[in-house]
Amino acid sequence: PRDTTQLPYLKVIRQGQLSKTKITENGKKIRKNWSSSYGILSDQMLLLYKDAKSATQSRTAASPAKPELSLDLNGATIEWCSNKSSRKNVFQLSTVFGLQLLLQDEDGIEARQWYEAIRSAISQLPCG
Ligand code: I3S
C-alpha cells in the first residue's frame, strides 16, 4: 500500500493504531462498543479507519479511502477522563456536532502523543 503521508490533500500529522468507542452521537448517549482503529490525524480532521490497510486503499489518486469515522476538529474539545471507562489512558474527544468519542491506547506514551497531537491541532484552528 502507498504511504498515506504522500497524499497531497491531507497534511498528515500523526497516524497509527488506537482504540475508540462512541459514547454520544447527535447529543444522545449510546452504548459503548470499543474497537481498534487506525487513526490519521490531519490539521483539520481526525480520520478513523478499520485498520491500516483500509486507510491506504485510495479509490483514486485524488480521493482518499472512506474512513469509518471522520471528526471535524474545529471547535472540538479534548480531555483526559478516568471516570468513563475502566480502561487506562482514556481521553474524550467531543465535536461541535454532538459526537463524543473515547480514545485509548494501552501504551501510555502513545496515548499521550495522540492526545497532545490532537490538542495541538485543535488549538490551531479558528474555533480552537
Ligand atoms: O461504562 P460501562 O457501561 O461500564 O461500559 C462498558 C460496557 O459498555 C460494556 O458493554 P455492555 O454494554 O455489553 O456491558 C463494554 O464491553 C465495556 O467495554 C464497557 O466498559 P469499559 O470500562 O471497557 O469502557
Image (tube, rainbow, N blue to C red):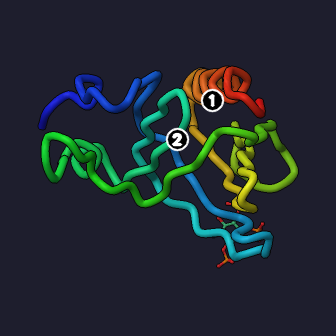
Mark earlier in primary sequence (2, 1): 2
The amino acid on which the numbered mark 2 sits, given as a three-letter code, is Leu
Give me the residue at 74% from left, 67% from top: 24
Give me the residue at 84% from left, 44% from top: 82
Quadrant of the picture in which ligand 1 is shown: bottom right
Q: From the top left corner, tell me how far across and down residue 65 is, in percent.
A: 27, 51
Task: Looking at the picture, tell me which residue is in the foreground, 65 or 102.
Answer: 65
Q: From the top left corner, tell me how far across and down residue 84 is, in percent.
A: 82, 55
As helix, strand or loop, the secondary structure at mark 2 comes to strand
The amino acid on which the numbered mark 1 sits, given as a three-letter code, is Ile
Q: Which quadrant does the C terminus fall into?
A: top right
Against 59, residue 78 (above or below) is above
Q: Is residue 108 visible?
A: no
Q: Is residue 90 visible?
A: yes
Q: Which quarter of the picture shows residue 121?
A: top right
As helix, strand or loop, the secondary structure at mark 1 comes to helix
Q: From the top left corner, tell me how far across and down residue 11 is, in percent.
A: 40, 24
Question: Which residue corresponds to mark 1?
Answer: 118
Question: Which residue corresponds to mark 2?
Answer: 46
Q: Which class describes the residues within 10 Å of circle 2: few (<14), some (14-19), or many (20+)?
A: many
Give me the residue at 75% from left, 40% from top: 75
